[in-house]
Amino acid sequence: MTESKDTTARFVAAFNAHDEKALQELHSDDIKFNAPGGFKATNAKDATGYAMTWLKAFPDGKMTVRTELTSGPWVVQEVAMEGTHTAPLEAPNGSIPATYKKVKGYGVQILKVENGKIAEARIYFDQLDQMSQLGLIPAPAAV
């Protein structure tokens, strides 16, 4: 297994174990991290904080890798995220109270691994679908 694949596999395992310390150790101290909603992090603490925000709001939250492509230091993962929203979700526009709804969403993370740590991370997911599943906006009409 390549260093990149090994590191990203350890990240998924740490995420699913809700292991904040392991996540922090896997993020580079000067990570370049971007996520929907304009979130940016430039250090391991803030990048780990982003993951923990989700894991606190979805205590049974789990990530499953559906497809993975590796090229040198880069790993692209199509992921399914699922969990039950049982605690407040701290979002860019404020706190979203628990809805107690189970959600399953799909997204992509593009990760660059250097020296056994994630040096760059870009996350993409359908925020509209997620908000609809949480019951925060009406579901889009079927066509």
Image (cartoon, rainbow, N blue to C red):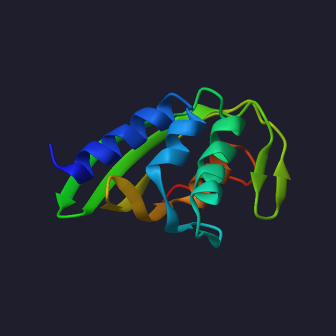
Which residue is at the front of the view, 72 or 85? 72
- Residue pictured at 36% horizontal, 61% vertical: 111
Mark yes or no: residue 140 visible: no
Q: Position of residue 132 (x, y in %)?
A: 65, 50
Please state if 118 lies on the left or on the right of 19 as rendered. Answer: left
Q: Is residue 14 above or below residue 96?
A: above
Q: Position of residue 55 (x, y in %)?
A: 63, 38
Q: Position of residue 51 (x, y in %)?
A: 59, 47
Q: Is residue 136 above or below residue 29?
A: above
Which residue is at the front of the view, 49 or 76? 49
Mark yes or no: residue 132 visible: yes
Give the quadrant of the N terminus: top left
Q: Is residue 102 above or below residue 76?
A: above
Which residue is at the front of the view, 11 or 91? 11
Please state if 10 lies on the left or on the right of 34 as rendered. Answer: left
Q: Is residue 60 above or below residue 126?
A: above
Which residue is at the front of the view, 35 or 26? 26
